[in-house]
Amino acid sequence: MSGQTEIMWGEVAEIASANEWKDTLLDEVADIIPGFAFKSQEFGSRGEVVIKIKDINQGFVDFNNTDRVVTLNYAKGKLDKYRISFGDYVVAMTGATIGKVGRVKLNKTALINQRVAKIKSKPGISNDFVYYCLSGEDFQLFIQNNIDSNSAQENISGGSIGRYPILLPPLAEQRAIAGVLCSLDDKIDLLHRQNATLEALAETLFRQWFVEEAKDEWEERKVGDIATHLKVGINPVANPTVMYHQYSLPAYDNGQVPTRELGLEILSNKYEVSPNTILISKLNPRFPRIWAIGNSIEDNSVCSTEFQVFKPKKQSLYAYFYFLIKSEDVVGEMTMAASGTSGSHQRIRPEDILNIKVRIPSIEKAEEFSSITQGFIDKADKDRRVIQTLSTLRDTLLPKLMSGEVRVAY
């Protein structure tokens, strides 16, 4: 929404809410379109992208590891209603991601598979407003309370989703509310894109210096010559009233912002996270999760034991080590060293990471690279803190705006 937004509090807002807002259900304001039942043998590496439940994260659709199907044998127009593009959003109807609402934030088009439902508002209803109605904790609680317990796998039907209650304001106010929340999300997305651009620039420079211009006479070193593996165990539940900052795999996937949780809420052991470390996920190194931890972090920071904590032996090598671990060659070595029964459950041991061999011209050259690119990491770290602030503001405002407790001038 352009211009300045006025938030109105108090008695006037409450009276207006009672007079103008209507109690409705989701299926009264939007169409719920379950995905197409493609056959398992149709999936491969070619054709149109298909979004499955595994590709849905809360807030966005992940296009990084999608499957594809060849659709040439389908009649023209048969699959049109199952297509999603920029701005569309879907709900996972089964599995570990059940209830998560993901939005397409890239300029891409895809089809949706069965057990994924597309939500599309009806005429006269703001599509963005309906999206934000489904983005809060109330919708997640509704999903959990309406899961079909008679099935072998947790699932929820389109009919059950359609019974989700929505308090509907006039269309102009729907758009104003969505405008406030969209402006916050747009700023968050912009910062994410800026960070991705900075990392891509640094990765390009790393590849030029240490891969494309590599020489046979360069000294071969192990990763263990450059970095140390840290393993300080923490039992948060022993300190139930302490607020911990947890670096978990879901937190990484949701924008690399640690979550805040009381010790009593964290039931498993964790590792201590200290400043100037790098977290490397053990799980599925073919698609690595590598998290750079800045020099200023909150007290009582911990990480999931699915992460391994590494620290460069010299601070001047921090940026070099970070982009070394992210490089294609090292990721390839980690993938080959991983063990497990399937691609999605393979894990890499810390000793295998430490034994990976790399060639560098000299420590001085690596330090020079670090001095150039350290600013990229620092900028990304600051941006993530802003993202965390904006996300907290959005999450605080969202239920208040959706309930009419806080009103927007329109």
Image (tube, rainbow, N blue to C red):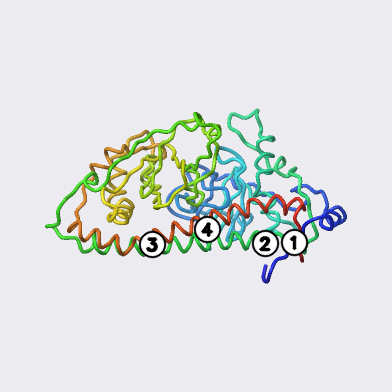
Secondary structure under the numbered disc 1 in the rendered image: strand
Q: Mark 1 near mark 2, Cβ–Cβ under 8 Å?
A: yes
- Type of amino acid under label 2: Val
Secondary structure under the numbered disc 2 in the rendered image: helix
Mark positioned earlier in the residue sequence (4 or 3): 3
Residue underneath mark 3: 376
Q: Residue furthest bottom?
A: 3
Q: Position of residue 200 (x, y in %)?
A: 38, 62
What's the CA distance linking mark 2 and mark 3?
30 Å
Residue underneath mark 2: 180
What's the CA distance linking mark 4 and mark 3?
15 Å
What's the CA distance linking mark 1 and mark 2?
8 Å
Q: Identify the residue shown where x is 50% and y is 52%.
A: 255
Q: Position of residue 299 (x, y in %)?
A: 46, 44
Dot 3: few (<14), some (14–19), or many (≥20) neighbours within 10 Å? some
Q: Quadrant of residue 216?
A: bottom left
Q: Identify the residue shown where x is 31% and y is 54%.
A: 318
Residue underneath mark 1: 408
Q: Position of residue 392 (x, y in %)?
A: 59, 52
What's the CA distance linking mark 2 and mark 4?
17 Å
